Amino acid sequence: MHTSPATLADWLAHLETLHPKAIDLGLERVAQVRERLGIVFDCPVITVGGTNGKGSTCAMLESILRQAGYKVGMYTSPHLLHFNERARLDGESATDAALVEQFVAVEAARGEISLTYFEFTTLAILRLFAGAGLDAVILEVGLGGRLDAVNVIDADVAIVTSVDIDHQEYLGDTREQIGVEKAGIFRAGRPAICSDPVPPKSLLAHAEAIGADLWLVGRDFNYSGDKQQWNYGGRSQRRNSLGYPSLRGANQLLNASAALAALEVLRLRLPVGAQEVRNGLVMVDWPGRFQVLPGRPTVVLDVAHNPHAAATLAQNLDNMGFHRFTYAVFGAMQDKDIDGIIAQLKDRIDHWCLTDLPLPRAASADSIRQKLLAAGVVPGDGPAAESSIACFATPAAAFANAINRADENDRIAVFGSFLTVAGVMEARNQDRSQAQFSLSSAQSSSQP
C-alpha cells in the first residue's frame, strides 16, 4: 500500500521523483490541475518576470504594500536555505504544516497527471495563497514566462524587469527570442510594465499584438535623482524625495521604478501613501542580492549566475571604493555561460576560490579553473602571490580558505549559483552558532 509522505522533507524528496524531466515547459498539465483545485484570486495579482532583478522587484513591492497595512503573499524561487522561503505570507515564510497540507491537496487533485517538482510546488503555494485572505499576491516567474507554471494565473499587472541571455536551451540564444518568452506573461488589455531600458523589439511587438497596455521606462515612467534622494514620475503620479532602497546595487532604481509603476496602475485598488513608499524602500530586505555583510574583511553575497548579472556585480564592486585584494568564491552550473561571467569579472578578482556544487549539472571547480586559464587569468607562485586559483569540494571550504588568507582591507565576493551563496550562508550560520555555544559554555562553567 502506498503511504503518503509525512514531513516537508519527505514530500520534497518524493516530488523529485514524480516526473521524468526536471524542467518540462508547458501550461496544459498545470492548468488542468489548477482547475481541479479551484484556485482563484479575489485580490490583485502582480507577476514579475525577467532575466535579472525579479526577486528584488518582488521584495520591494512586498515591503511597500506591507508598510501600507496590506496582507501580502509573495512567491519566489529558488530558495537559499529553506524551501519555506519560497512562500511568504505577511512577511513570514510558510510553515511546514501549511505547505504539507497543500501538497496533500495537489497530490489528490492531480490524479494521473504528471507534474514536475516546480509545477507541483507552484500549484501548492498558489492554493495556499488563494485560501489565505490576502490583499495582494506577488508571483515571481521561475524560467522564461510564456510556458512557466506561474503563467497559469492571469495577473492584473505583469512586469518584465530585464531581458538578457540565460537558459538558452529552453528560451533561445538571442534577446529577441528570449523577449517573446518573457512577454508571454502580458495579458490583453492589462498593464504590462517593462523596466529594461532597451527592450527587445519582439517584446514590444507581442505587447502590441495582444493589445496589452504597455508601460516602458523612459516613456511612461522614469526616475531622476542625486546622491541624497530620488524621484519617480509615471503617467499620472509623481513621488518625490524618496530615499534609496536598502538593496544596494546599480539597477535597484530601475527595479524600484517598475514596482512604483505597478503600484500606480493599482492605486485605486491598493492605495499607498508617500511615507509608506519611503518606509517600504528603506526597510526592504532581500538576501543574496549584492548583500554586503557587516564586519571586515568585506564580504559580498550575490547570486549573479549569468553575464548580465555579472556585469552589474562588476559595476557594483567598482563603486565600493578601494580594497587591496578581492577574493572570489565562485561555483556555477555547467549550462551557464561561465566564460561570459568570467569575462565580466576577471579584471576585478585577484584570488579565485572555486567550488564544486552538490548537483550533477554543476560545473566542477577544475573545469572552471580551465576556463579561467583560457581567459588569460595567470596565477602567481607561492603563498605571497598577488593572484591565485584554487579548487575546493564545497562552498564552505572555499570561503574558509578566502577568510584565512584575506586581511581586513580585502574583500570577498561570493557569487554564482544560489547553491554557492547558500553554502557560504549556511557555513557562516554554523560558525556563529558554534561561537555562541562556546561562549555560553564558558560563561556557565565560570559560574560559582
Image: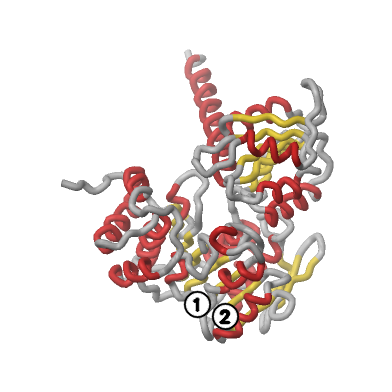
What x and y, as percent, mark residue 274?
Answer: 64, 71
Please tell me how crowded label 2 is: few (under 14), some (14-19), or many (20+) other residues with Cα within 10 Å.
many
Res 280 seen here: no
Residue 51, compared with residue 337, is above or below; it is below
What x and y, as percent, mark residue 382?
Answer: 79, 20
Task: Decide which of 440, 96 is in the foreground and name it.
Answer: 96
Q: Is residue 74 left or right of residue 365?
A: left
Residue type at the position of mark 2: Pro
Res 201 seen here: yes
What x and y, as percent, mark residue 101?
Answer: 29, 55
Q: Say whether marks 2 and 1 touch (CB < 8 Å).
A: yes
Residue 241, compared with residue 286, is above or below; it is below
Task: Decide which of 434, 217 is in the foreground and name it.
Answer: 217
| Occupied quadrant, residue 277 | bottom right
Q: Is residue 448 left or right of residue 14?
A: right
- Work out how far the residue at label 2 is from the one at label 1, CA to CA, in angstroms: 7 Å
Residue, disc 2:
191
Residue 142, compared with residue 2, is above or below; it is below
Q: Residue at horizontal 57%, vertical 45%?
A: 333
Q: Is residue 225 left or right of residue 211?
A: right
Q: Earlier in the sequence, mark 2 or mark 1?
A: 1
Residue type at the position of mark 1: Asp
Q: Is residue 72 left or right of residue 325?
A: left
* Disc assigned to residue 83: none
Residue, disc 1:
156
Task: Decide which of 6, 186 is in the foreground and name it.
Answer: 186
Residue 407, compared with residue 56, is above or below; it is above
